[in-house]
Amino acid sequence: GGCRTGMAKVTNAYDLPARKVIHTVGPRYAVKYHTAAENALSHCYRSCLEALIDLGLQ
């Protein structure tokens, strides 16, 4: 399945020149909700980095 905004999911890379691929869902941007979108985008990066650490990837 998919993942929610700000979350990361790791899959095998198959034929790509890597072992794994990290997928994340970025926020929809609206000027009215600038701060919320900025926080969600920050969470995307954080989730990806946490996935790297959890799996011992570089």
Image (cartoon, rainbow, N blue to C red):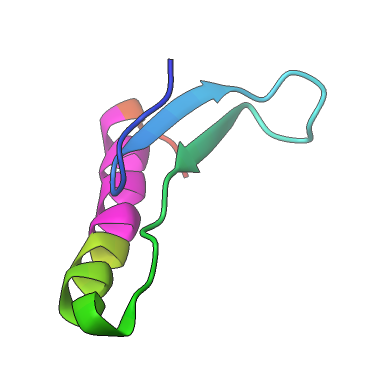
Instruction: Please name the predominant secondary structure of the magenta segment in the image.
Output: helix
Camera-side residue: 31 or 55? 31
Q: Residue at x 26, y 31 (%)?
A: 54
Residue, far right: 15
Give x and y (percent) for residue 47. Answer: 27, 46
Residue placed furthest toward the front: 32
Up-down: is 53 above or below 3? below
Does residue 9 appear to the left or right of 14 in the view shown?
Answer: left
Is residue 30 within the magenta segment? no
Q: Is residue 14 above or below residue 52?
A: above
Horizontal relation, residue 1 to residue 19: left or right: left
Residue at left 29%, top 40%?
Answer: 7
Based on the displayed image, in which of its 4 quarters is residue 17 positioned? Answer: top right
Residue 45 to residue 7: above or below? below
Residue 22 position, x and y percent, is 49, 37
Residue 2, percent from left and from top: 42, 24
Name the side, left or right, on which 18 lies relative to 27.
right
Picture residue at 43% right of the left edge, 15% below the top: 1
Residue 10 image-quadrant placement: top left
Q: Where are the magenta residues, as a range?
A: 43-54
Q: Residue 53 in the image: x percent, y percent?
A: 29, 40
Q: Is residue 17 above or below residue 38?
A: above
Q: Quadrant of residue 45?
A: bottom left
Does residue 47 show up magenta in the picture? yes
